[in-house]
Image (cartoon, rainbow, N blue to C red):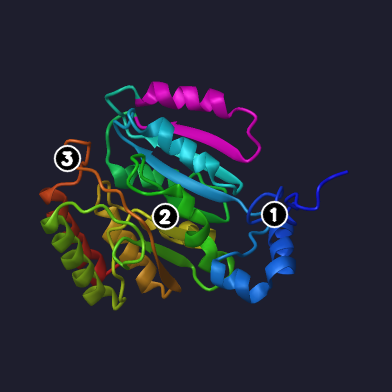
Amino acid sequence: MSSSSETQETPGENLRPWSRAWYEARVATIGESVCKNLGFYMIPDEFLLSVVIPVYNEEKTLKKLVSRVREVPITKEIILVNDCSRDNSASVLAELETEFAGDELNQIRVFHHGVNQGKGAAIRTGFSQVCGDVIVIQDADLEYDPSEYPRLIRPIVEDLADVVFGSRFLGNQAHRVLYFWHYMGNRFLTTLSNCFTNLNLTDMETCYKVFRRDVIDTITPLLQQDRFGIEPEMTARVARRNYRIYETSISYSGRTYAEGKKIGWKDGISALWCIVRYGIRD
């Protein structure tokens, strides 16, 4: 006979997180209002998330990053675009394709550029291949945490937003302390972008930009920037079309240049030009 002190199984404990059955089990246990305050909600069973990952010389972090993406319990297609890496990233991608074969929750698709074109070009390639309902951009390093996807996509799943920016500067998530002038540069570029777009974003340069599928279908044919100028360009294009834009806080574990950080002062100058260029006209 089992002891009365044995721990009882929580309803829905063995269900996939964020699924309809999982959410309904929690509502039945703690109530809808508590679920809302805890950030619990339902992702439809037929939902597909597209994760677009530009890759350039990321052999040291690529496997670990993709493993973290894989762990997120949402049905996903993971689109990796190798921008002519000079290290062993291509070999790592081939290993990942073999490893993911037969994974029903995570379909992996790999594309290669014959010449290095830049992050923006890799994002455009990824956008042109997506099949999902919602699309998120993910850097191939370990600066951004994929476990935050459920929080990032929630405003879109609940039909509150068309686009979501994950902000490193909203203040209630862990944030590695690094370069003061990078911080000031980001704030300056975001403020200038806001002046042209009439938005009140706190982090225009964030990697974590999330889009409804119809937004991607609209803006992808218009995108032009090959490098980091893609960030202000995407921002200006979604602002001009009056999409519903939300921000949510994210954690950030930034890299030093010794650890592989790639963006430099020339990219800042380019971002200035792109803010003015796309802020004035399409």
In the rendered image, residue 103, in percent from the top left (x then y), is placed at 63, 33
Badge 1 crowding class, 10 Å Cα cut-off, few under 14, some 14 to 19, many 20 or more, is few
Q: What residue is at 32 percent from the left and 32 percent from the top?
A: 58
- Quadrant of the frame with the C terminus: bottom left
Is residue 212 among the parts visible in the rendering? no
Q: CA distance from mark 1 to mark 2?
A: 27 Å
**Alpha carbon separation for disc pair 3 and 2:** 31 Å
| Amino acid at pointer 2 | Thr
Residue at 71% of width from left, 59% of height from top?
A: 20
- Which is closer to the viewer, label 1 or label 2? 1
For the residues labelled 1 and 3, the Cα–Cα distance comes to 41 Å
The vertical placement of 198 against 19, above or below, is: below
Residue 64: x and y, percent? 42, 34
Q: Amino acid at mark 3?
A: Tyr
Circle 3 sits on which residue?
A: 257
Answer with left or right where residue 142 lies relative to residue 189. Answer: right
Is there a contact, CB below 8 Å, between mark 3 and mark 2? Answer: no
Looking at the rendering, the stretch of residues picked out in magenta corresponds to 89-113
Residue 238: give x, y in percent of width and height: 38, 67
Screen quadrant of the N terminus: top right
Q: Earlier in the sequence, mark 1 or mark 2?
A: 1
Label 3 CA crowd tier, 10 Å (few <14, some 14–19, many 20+): few
Residue visible at 58% across and 69% down in the picture: 158
Q: Position of residue 80 (x, y in %)?
A: 44, 37
- Name the residue tied to disc 2: 220
Helix, strand or loop at label 3? It is loop
Q: In this picture, is 87 found above or below 229? A: above
Query: In the image, is residue 3 above or below residue 159?
Result: above
Residue under circle 1?
A: 45
